[in-house]
Amino acid sequence: MVQEEIRRRNAGALLRHVHLRGPLSRAELSERMGLNRSTIMALTTELSRLGLVGEESPVDTGRAGRPSLVVRPASERCYVLAFDVAVDRLVAARVGLGGRILDRREAVRPRAGPDLHDVVTVLARFGRQLHRAAPPGACCVGVGASYCGMIRPGDGMVRYGPDLGWVDQAFGDELGGRLGLGLPVSVGNEAHLGAQAEQQRGAGVGLDDLVYLHGDVGVGGGIIVGGRLLGGGSGYGCELGHMVVNPYDGRPCGCGSRGCLEAEVGERALLDAAGRPAELFGRAAVRTVADDADRGDPMAREALRRIGDWLGIGVANLINLFNPGVVVFGGMLCDLYPGAAAQVRGRIARHVLPVARETVRLRTAALGDDATLVGAAELGFARLLDDPLAALTAPVSPEVGVPTSAPVPGFRRRRQV
């Protein structure tokens, strides 16, 4: 029994390596995992039989001796559906094992108040289209979704989505039912998922301590400490946007407080500082201010300076608290940070302890606007990566590398047509 548990754990670890790092030779896997080559061969054979990995001869390495086979994730055969719900957009994607986005759909989300029915209708339609477009025999192993609000762990309930008034909306259950694939939908907060995606695949690869700030209409955050997401006692931690930075004469915040970080650096704060009319809003308006500042417009430059100053105060506090290796700016902040960097760095120089600021790096999200979508995909893959041998146990045809029997319960295969 102990040996079987070890085998399952090693299979999951090997699959996670190729999922996150891409094709790796058997020799590299042996070195990374501390296992002998015969064990690696047995594990890759089993995962290949399940249609999760493929093996191929490497290109000419120029080295003497027999080359080690390269193990690669079976991206086209094994995939998840990933959804990203932001304030102004809805995105759905088919994401293959290995993290490759294979196909996607996108729609505008109007700012029209509580809109659970509309959001689920659009995403379910996109999800069914993506599933039908998958190659015959490909297997959907999970569904993950990112939402711009506070998510109750375990059931995908949106407890609070401030920008469009969602309160206790059963998003995960509704989307799963409308998709009709028989798969549960795992839901996470967008900034939490963005932090994990950047740590696994983006600007924070190789670092165990990371702060991620995500700008949409407001500001969210995710903190990785010791390689793990800091979730808090109930899963609602890291609401960095509601850290108070300007308590005395701060702007009113949607949460009911004043002077929160998101109130001082969010979309409306920027547009007001740049003198833009109230009817202008959205990502395009934000980018226009950033572009105008680049061209020397004095009002736009002053707006970015002001935003950067408040952002810098918030970032300085976070660095002093968590001593991260990197602070990553995502979402709308990707557009604003280049023009506000001088103010952010100035605040860090003045307010962060020298030993903490020596090594911290400031980066924009390497995954760009897909950080939250990639994080949602990882939610979908979680069950498979935890125990691939238990998750997929059907026999596999050596000719095509997909199960030849009926679909495994809990997963949905694209039928041959």
Image (cartoon, rainbow, N blue to C red):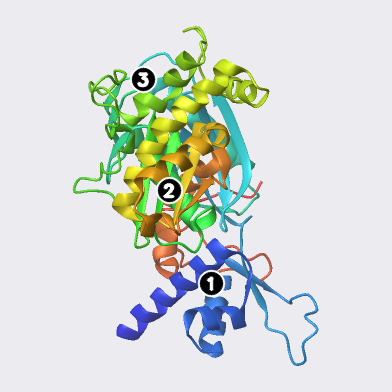
Spatial CA distance of label 3 from label 2 is 23 Å
Is residue 152 at least partly visible in the picture? yes
Q: Report which residue position mark 1 lands on.
A: 47
**Residue count near mark 1 (Cα–Cα under 10 Å), binned few <14, some 14–19, many ≥20:** many
Q: Name the residue type under label 1.
A: Leu
What label does residue 15 carry, if any? Answer: none
The vertical placement of 14 against 371, above or below, is: below
As drawn, the residue found furthest toward the front would be 350
Discs 3/2, front: 2
Q: Earlier in the sequence, mark 1 or mark 2?
A: 1
256 sits to left or right of 288? left
123 sits to left or right of 113? right
Q: Of residues 230 and 392, which is closer to you in this image? A: 230
As drawn, the residue found furthest toward the bottom would be 65
Q: Report which residue position mark 3 lands on.
A: 164
Determine whether the residue tagged by mark 3 lies in a helix, strand or loop: loop
Do the numbered discs 3 and 1 sit on residues whose CB atoms are within 8 Å? Answer: no
Q: Earlier in the sequence, mark 3 or mark 1?
A: 1
Q: Name the residue type under label 3.
A: Leu
Determine whether the residue tagged by mark 1 lies in a helix, strand or loop: helix
What label does residue 195 carry, if any? Answer: 2
Q: Position of residue 54 (x, y in %)?
A: 64, 69
Q: Of residues 108 and 352, which is closer to you in this image? A: 352
Q: Name the residue type under label 2.
A: Ala
Discs 3/1, front: 3
Q: Position of residue 254 (x, y in %)?
A: 30, 20
Q: Position of residue 339 (x, y in %)?
A: 57, 32
The vertical placement of 327 against 53, above or below, is: above
Q: Position of residue 119 (x, y in %)?
A: 44, 25
The vertical placement of 401 against 235, above or below, is: below
